[in-house]
Image (cartoon, rainbow, N blue to C red):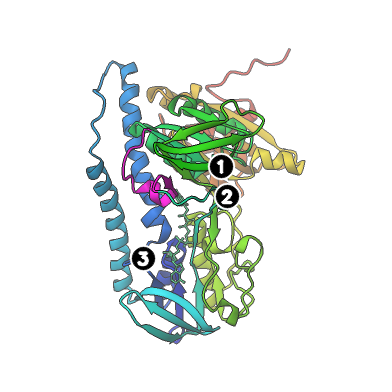
Amino acid sequence: MADTSKLHIAVVGGGPGGYAAAFLASDLGMKVTLIDPEVNPGGVCLYRGCIPSKALLHVAKLIEESHQAKNWGIEFADPKIDLSKLRSWKESVVKKLTGGLGQLSKQRSVQYVQGTAGFQNSNSLKVKKTSGGEEIMAFDKIILATGSRPAVIPSLKIDSARMLDSTGALDIKDIPKTLLVVGGGYIGLELGSVYAALGTRVSVVEMTGGLLPGADRDLVLPLHKKLEKAFEAILLNTTVASLKEEKNGIRATFEGKDVKEREKVYDKVLVSVGRKPNSEIEGLDKTKVKVGQRGFIQVNNQLQTDDPAIFAIGDLVGEPMLAHKASHEGRTAVEVIAGHKYTFEPSAIPAVVFTDPEIAWAGLTETQAQKEGREVKVAKFPWGASGRAITLDRTDGMTKLLIDPGTERVLGVGIVGPGAGELIAEGVLAIEMAALAGDLELTIHPHPTLSETIMEAAEVFYGTSTDVYRPKRA
Ligand SMILES: Cc1cc2nc3c(=O)[nH]c(=O)nc-3n(C[C@H](O)[C@H](O)[C@H](O)COP(=O)(O)OP(=O)(O)OC[C@H]3O[C@@H](n4cnc5c(N)ncnc54)[C@H](O)[C@@H]3O)c2cc1C
């Protein structure tokens, strides 16, 4: 093992990519400096992304289930919402986690510098400290993990308190009567679901022909049906041509082949049309780092940039812009710096949409297989045949496997239904371990659980599912 104790590395950006890298580097014996403007590590994910959104979605789910309970003989009164208490609860979740990361930094003797870093040259950074003043610091290696920010559409940019991006939406300053969500991707649908549960009439506008472009349509369908009831409108094949502030709201005009109402006024508008990498780092031009198309920093599969002293990870280097991808890349970069033989070559990076129902997939999707003309066998297990789903009154789910017809290897897993985000981990493991459908079929799953749907989907592949009867052909 290489002697890492003499290496001093800097990690710029304290998100899930940055802090995972910094902590591992310290565990491997390196001297580590972690630089981020926030008081503690956490980045977008903990301060204004994954964590606050999931805390609010938990509340949304509770409200939704309280309505559903009517079907089971229990009627709750409409919820009274104390917005400031809800906000403080969400903030306490963020504080607990980010404070914990601050503690972990101290325990590992990671030098945490609150500030913003730019380059002097490939091996030294100029750090503008939040407390004031600047410091020039030299390092053996630097890992860039500056993440991303919400993308803006210049023609729709208006200076108004009624306009929100994901960060503003998570602040839940108030519960608007109406909200237009521009963009039918996962962030827009998650935040739209929160506001709808709190009582806002939500409309979502998406320029393509379906919500969650890129996800398999059969997974999206149950969510679409549910959101049609929860939302006031889902406007597909529609673009927002203009936004204009008026006395009572923002007037949006729409264009597109399916448009019925050309314009409408909304209390607030949330623009969630993707994210842009934070690659405009001061002094980056003094290094050999190359920035590619769409602003992503170019790296190889060891997360090395074109500059031998500089690595880059996370949202800054490309899709999928997800926290777990960022942290695995961060850990890979550190292993490479430590001289270990490591590459970032996952067989599957799971994607989860935390709506109700949740949607999750890993590995090959059916959409991708069709696009590539790749032959696959698809085995689907409908949750209507799952005992656990019936006890939860959630038979709208489905689990499917994409299987290589020759080797019977599991190439992809897709799940829609409550808890899909937890269940997909088994699919990821199956793909990473090159499991065959038979491995899933022969693995005893606990009863009654939704995890059985993965085993039973494998049984469907063999035509032997206990709970799905397929009449034999004459
Ligand atoms: C609303 C929302 C919900 C999301 N939900 C999920 C989810 O459920 N699951 C999931 O996997 N992903 C989710 N994401 C995406 C996830 O937040 C990102 O993929 C993840 O945070 C990327 O991690 P990162 O380490 O690359 O960078 P970030 O988390 O973006 O952190 C980068 C940090 O670097 C700092 N920084 C920037 N420039 C400098 C500089 N020059 N010097 C010092 N510091 C700098 C930034 O201030 C920031 O703190 C969500 C995002 C949003 C917006």
Q: Nearer the viewer, residue 395 or 288?
A: 288
Q: Tell me, yes or no, if residue 30 can be seen here.
A: no
Magenta includes 93? Answer: no
Please report contact status of discs 2 and 1: CB closer than 8 Å, yes or no: yes
Q: Residue furthest top?
A: 474
Whether residue 40 is situated above or below residue 97 in the rendered picture: below
Q: Where on the image, by quarter, is ligand 1? A: bottom left
Per the model, the C-alpha gap separating discs 2 and 1 is 7 Å
CA distance separating discs 3 and 2: 34 Å
Give the class, few, some or many, for how many residues have Cα within 10 Å of label 2's Cα (few <14, many ≥20): few
Residue shown at 56% from the left, 21% from the top: 468
The residue sitting at the right extreme is: 373
Return the residue at label 2. 155
Residue occupying image coordinates x 53% and y 23%: 466
Tell me which segment is drawn in magenta. Answer: 161-177
Q: Earlier in the sequence, mark 2 or mark 1?
A: 2
| Kind of residue sitting beneath label 1 | Ser
| Earlier-in-chain disc, 3 versus 2 | 3
Label 2: which secondary element: helix
Tell me the kind of residue under disc 3: Pro
In the rendered image, which residue does mark 3 sit on?
41
Mark 1 to mark 3: distance in Å?
38 Å
The answer to the question of whether label 3 and label 2 lie on touching residues, with beta carbons closer than 8 A, is no
Does the magenta segment cover residue 164? yes
Mark 3 vs mark 2: in front = 2
Residue 242, numbered circle: 1
For ligand 1, tell me if the residue under mark 1 lies within 8 Å. no
Q: Position of residue 281 (x, y in %)?
A: 52, 72
The kind of residue on which mark 2 rests is Ser
Is 70 or 294 nearer to us in this picture?
A: 294
